[in-house]
Every structure is written in structure tokens, then in C-alpha cells.
Image (cartoon, rainbow, N blue to C red):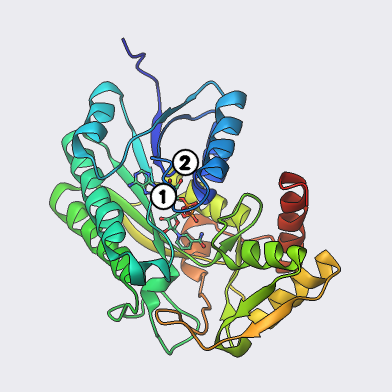
Amino acid sequence: MHKVKQRTILLTGGAGFIGFHTAKKLLERGDSLIIVDNFNDYYDPELKRARAKILTSKYDAVEFEEVDIADYKALENIFKNEKIDKVCHLAAQAGVRYSLEHPFAYERTNITGTLNLLELCRHYGVKDFIYASSSSVYGNNKKLPFSEADRVDTPISLYAASKKSNEEMAYTYHHLFGLNCTGLRFFTVYGPWSRPDMALFLFTKAILQGKAINVFNNGEMARDFTYIDDIVSGVIASIDKSYSYEIFNLARGESIKLMDYIAEIEKNLGKEAKKNMMPIQPGDVPKTSADISHAREKLGYDPQTSVPTGVKNFIQWYKRYYNA
Ligand SMILES: NC(=O)c1ccc[n+]([C@@H]2O[C@H](COP(=O)([O-])OP(=O)(O)OC[C@H]3O[C@@H](n4cnc5c(N)ncnc54)[C@H](O)[C@@H]3O)[C@@H](O)[C@H]2O)c1
């Protein structure tokens, strides 16, 4: 027999980087969580297991369901057995470059998986659906900073196309079935426990090992790097607000040049990087920069962490975790 809890959030991707930090914050403040994650090996599953262990060893109000969101029946069993108030959907096949070689992974998790969740929200009376989109939906948008009012009809990777599709699917379920949907366009998120396929992690690892780093577009890149705690504050505000239909940029609101970001890593490691200067990669955009006024106004979103502080925190974590 399952105990019916007062307020339960179903969080997908809770063993992932952003999901883990979001789960921790929700549990700290007393929410009950059911986390759905399939612990796949897109990157080291041990890192996912370590995140999950922190959550389950510290908090009682969390349970993990090792389920693939593309498996409708398995997912439906969870909705049948639990009273779910809100769904926070952060599971995805992430990564722009990987999508060039593995398009069907994006179809399976990002399209089918998201559709399964929307259908189950519809049939099991869930009121709120908060989900991760991405800055990549802006494609090669020439107008900076990117604003939610800009057209986003030209995704330049299948990852971006899958995230744009998610926004449209959410709109349809909002329109047809009254599901409250909030989509969050995250901009290059970084911080402790981050994904091993992302620049900060790759660069830190390579520099410490004395290996060269790949610097794309000959360093002529810039990103609105966003610290994980700021992202989590925006996700949680979205969960609490229950807006009927919204899309928000969640970013720091400041574009940093890639070479300055690398210099910050070098400074913290006390070591200069060997750099392979490379052309831009297909699917990559040279610059991202976000207008975050909409999130400021409607979510009270107010990012606090600068790149120097954020990079320092990541490197402290990395050295401790990997004994480097
Ligand atoms: N990290 C960023 O900079 C960034 C930027 C923009 C958008 N996003 C989006 O934010 C969300 C979280 O990203 P992240 O960086 O934490 O990635 P992550 O890969 O660390 O987390 C995703 C989690 O989802 C799980 N997952 C993947 N496919 C699944 C499936 N079929 N069934 C069940 N679980 C599955 C993975 O095991 C993983 O634990 C994703 O939707 C991603 O697309 C991230």
C-alpha cells in the first residue's frame, strides 16, 4: 500500500545535474518528491548514482523510480499509485554535438518522453507542468540579447528542434486540456556536480591532466553562463507560481567571452591551458545572451552568482570529488 502524501512533486531527471540541485532544494524546504530517472550512460552513471545517494541518505521524503520516461506503461504505474500535484520535467537527452550523431535518442527521450508526461498529466489530473527548454531554441538569432518575444523558428541542431517541439507540445496541452505549463530556457548552466560533457568540466579535467583543450571558433565564442543556484531559484519560483502558460529565459543576463572564462579556470587552477584552436562545430551558436526581464518581473528571479565565484565553487568541488 502506498501512503498518500500531502503535496508531491514528480521530478524527472533528478539524478542529473540540474535535477539533483533542484531536488535538494525542494527536499530542504519540505516537499515530497518522486524522482524518475533511468541513470543512462550518456555520461558516467556513477556520478548520477552519487548524486542520488546524497538525496536518499539525507532525506526521507524522496523516492527514486528507475524508469525510462519513454516507457508509457512504466511511467503510468507511478501516476496510478501516487497522488502527484505537480510535474517538474528536467530529464532529457542533452547536448548539441551528440545530437548530430544520435538523433533518435532525442526523439525517444525528448519527444516521446515529454509526450508521455503530458498525456499522464492530462489523464491523472495534474495541474502544473514545469519543464526545461533551452537557449538553443534561439538558433542563429542575430538579435541580442535573446528575448522570449523573438521568433524561434530556426533551430540549428536536432537538440534545439526537440526543445522547441516541447514548447509547442506544452502549448497544445495547455490549450486543449487546461494544463498549466511553464517552459524554462536555461542558458549554459554550470557549477558543482555539473555534467562531464560541458566546457567547464572538460577544461578543468584536461588542464589538470596537462592535456590540450579544444577551443572552438578560435575562441570567438561567448555564453551567458548561469550558475546552478540561480537556475534552481528560477525553477522553484516557477513551481510555486503555477502560471497558466509561460516561457522564461533563465540566465545570468551577462555574456562572457569564452577566452575570459578559460582565463578564470586557469587562474583558479594556477595552470595555463594548452589550447587547440578549432573551427566552430556544426550546430553550435557563436554567442548567447539573454534578456531576463520577464523572469525578473514574474518570478522575482534575481541571479546572484558571478562567473569568478561560480568557477571557483566548481573547481573546489571538482578537486575534492575527484581527489585531483
Ligand atoms: N546544463 C545546461 O547547461 C542546460 C542548458 C539548457 C537546457 N538544459 C536542460 O535542462 C535539463 C537538465 O539538464 P542537465 O544539464 O541536468 O542534464 P543531465 O544529463 O545531467 O540530466 C538529465 C537526467 O535525465 C535522465 N534521463 C535522460 N533520459 C532519460 C529517460 N529517457 N528516462 C528517464 N531519465 C532520463 C538522465 O539520466 C539524467 O540524470 C535538460 O532538459 C536539458 O536539456 C540544460
Mark 1 and mark 2: Cα distance apart in space: 7 Å
Classify mark 2: helix, strand or loop.
loop
Report if the beta carbon of the residue with label 1 is closer than 8 angstroms to ligand 1: yes
Q: Nearer the viewer, residue 315 or 170?
A: 315
The percent position of residue 306, horizontal first and vertical second, equals 71, 66
Quadrant position of the N terminus in the picture: top left
Left or right relative to 231: residue 120: left
Residue at 37% across, 52% down: 131
* Relative height, residue 53 to residue 155 (above, below): above
Classify mark 1: helix, strand or loop.
loop
Q: Which residue is mark 2?
A: 14
Residue at 40% across, 66% down: 98
The percent position of residue 176, horizontal first and vertical second, equals 13, 52
Crowding at label 2, few (<14), some or many (≥20) Cα neighbours within 10 Å?
A: many
Q: Pointer 1 and pointer 2: residues touching (CB < 8 Å)? A: yes
The picture quadrant where one finds residue 220 is bottom right
Q: Which residue is mark 1?
A: 90
The percent position of residue 207, horizontal first and vertical second, equals 74, 68
Left or right relative to 137: residue 192: right
The percent position of residue 298, horizontal first and vertical second, equals 46, 59
Left or right relative to 203: residue 156: left
Q: Residue furthest left?
A: 176
The picture quadrant where one finds residue 216 is bottom right
Report if the beta carbon of the residue with label 2 is closer than 8 angstroms to ligand 1: yes
Q: Nearer the viewer, residue 243 or 41?
A: 41
Kindly tell me whether residue 29 is visible in this rendering: no
Kindly identify the amino acid type of the residue bearing the numbered disc 2. Answer: Gly
Kindly tell me whether residue 83 is visible in this rendering: yes
Residue at 23% across, 25% down: 80
Left or right relative to 191: residue 144: left
Which numbered disc, 1 or 2, marks the residue that appears first in the sequence?
2
